[in-house]
Image (cartoon, rainbow, N blue to C red):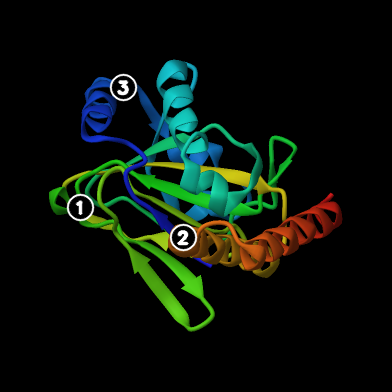
Amino acid sequence: MFRVIHGVLTAPELADVAGELRVGRFNDGAASARGSARQVKHNEQLDPKQHQALISSVTQKIVGHSHFRGFAMPLDTYPVLINRFSVGMEYGNHIDVASIGGMRTDLSLTLFLSDPASYEGGELVVETEVGEQSFKLPAGSLLLYPANRMHRVNKVTRGERLAAVSWAKSAIADTEKRDLCVDLDMALHRLYSRHGSCTETDQISKVINKLRHLWGRESG
């Protein structure tokens, strides 16, 4: 399932990021791609060695967000890669690698850093069970989706698209099982807000914890 998380970065934080990126050092993005993805990746990537503090800060903002932790159930998260798409740049259809840096990639994420009104094109298009779905989120918003989905970034035709991408290893590797736990947990919180603690909420909480332990052991 696709999860949208708004407000991962605040307006002042986005302004700070934009300021550093304006003078940042970018390299050919294809250099970091693997396999056939190198043939379809046409963008630029912020040099991670020159901008370690910024990359660490953005990564921690994502990892520390309560909705990200609730949706992803992360055991580990890879440091973000910050990409720039200028006019004419795009990233063709591809599937992310199954592991990166020795970490299993269960989830892919994209944190949008540019105001969507400031550029044309550049939509993130992801394959779903019912066809393709296009995303162009407000700056500071994040899209979380299964890493095994075919996806692409459409060609930018005006302006500049900036985004941070990363991957997470989840405590529950299976997408359907993880989403079931998330949906149950969200329903539980709604019940708490309406009725407080009661026998029914205790029972649902017990079921959720049992499923997390059971499916977590399966994930290894």
**Element carrying mark 2:** strand
**Which residue is found at the position 74% from the left and 55% from the top?**
209
| Cα distance between the residues tagged 2 and 3 | 30 Å
Residue 57 at x, y = what percent?
A: 43, 24
| Cα distance between the residues tagged 1 and 3 | 21 Å
* Residue type beneath disc 2: Arg
**Element carrying mark 1:** helix
- Read off the residue under disc 3: 24
Q: Is residue 61 visible?
A: yes
**Element carrying mark 3:** loop
Residue 3 at x, y = what percent?
A: 46, 60
**Rendered image quadrant of residue 23:** top left
In the rendered view, tell whether residue 114 sits above or below residue 55: below
**Which residue is found at the position 63% from the left and 51% from the top?**
35
Residue 116, labelled with which disc? 1
For marks 1 and 3, the one nearer the N-term is: 3
| Cα distance between the residues tagged 2 and 1 | 19 Å
For marks 2 and 3, the one nearer the N-term is: 2
